[in-house]
Amino acid sequence: MSLSAISTQPRILIFDSGVGGLSIMGEIQQKLPYAPLIYASDNVFFPYGTKGEAELTERVDKVFRKITAHYLVDIIVVACNTASTLTLPHIRSHFSQPIVGVVPAIKPAAARSQSQVIGLLATPATVARPYTHNLICEYASNAEVISVGSSELVALAEQKLRGKQVLPEQLKPILKPFFDHPRGKDMDTLVLACTHFPLLRGELKAEFPNHLELIDSGEAIARRVASLLGDKVFPESVPEHLAVFTQSSPSVESLRPSLHQFGIHRLDILEI
């Protein structure tokens, strides 16, 4: 889709299987406070990190076709590292909208680290994926990268947005490999390589020395979305945001207070 084809009031779709993509939505709202946004969660298929490539590609294609048939969508943000690394080539060849993916922020972390000891906190699938290894080889070949994979941290982020407190004793076992590593004390940069993890930024920061910098992809994604919009100007009024889930459930209803904090007051169910 050319920029001229973007509608006068472009609507941005932010997509994930769970609520991790809300961290990306928050960054886009900081950059584009008047842009109307659709947050879509494929909660039927959550979590994406446990799915195979063919299965996930087919599912994402199906969900995108249904969403774009029901709602005006001008830009698609795939706010999930797993879906981005596995499905972007397919969906970019099958959908006309500009599509922005999320990748682990290895490159900026390597550029900003003074010690060249970098932590990578991701899901186990992202840690193991060749795509991630290639990023490290390309941008951080001279650094020591300490990689830790955790699915439990995803669940804790989901629970936090449903009103449950995340306690230090829940985080310490997850983060222990960083401290046990021979060079862990030299780590000055930590890449949050799952969109769920910035939702726990405060809790994670409290577990590390003050000098450690947490880096994620949210701000870069927001800049990319803004650049795709070019010189489009939004009316300076409170935009109407929308959340879409692929299945109704009590866990969706328990998200309403957190969705309100992101300015989302309308919630649709689109069964897929």
Image (cartoon, rainbow, N blue to C red):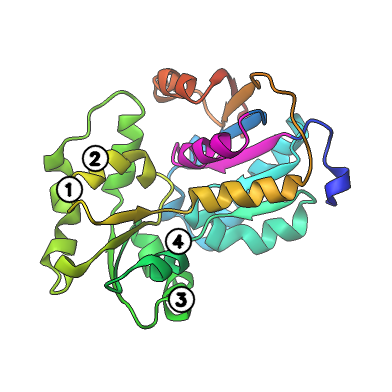
Q: For mark 1, what is the residue?
A: 207
* Residue 142 at least partly seen: yes
Spot occupied by residue 260 in the image (x, y as percentages of width and height): 48, 19
* Residue 41 at least partly seen: no
Circle 2/circle 4 CB separation < 8 Å = no
Circle 3: residue type? Tyr
Circle 1: residue type? Glu
First to last magenta residue range:
11-33
Circle 2/circle 1 CB separation < 8 Å = yes
Circle 3/circle 4 CB separation < 8 Å = no
Circle 3/circle 1 CB separation < 8 Å = no
Task: Determine the secondary structure under disc 1.
Answer: loop
Residue at 53% of width from left, 55% of height from top? 102
Distance between the Cα atoms at labels 2 and 1?
7 Å
Spot occupied by residue 159 in the image (x, y as percentages of width and height): 31, 32
Mark 2 Cα within 10 Å, few/some/many (few <14, many 20+)? some
**Mark sitting on residue 139:** 3
**Mark sitting on residue 203:** 2
Spot occupied by residue 44 in the image (x, y as percentages of width and height): 50, 36
Residue at 51% of width from left, 42% of height from top? 24
Spot occupied by residue 238 in the image (x, y as percentages of width and height): 64, 19
Q: Nearer the viewer, mark 1 or mark 4?
A: 1
Q: For mark 4, what is the residue?
A: 104
Task: Determine the secondary structure under disc 4.
Answer: loop
Circle 4: residue type? Pro
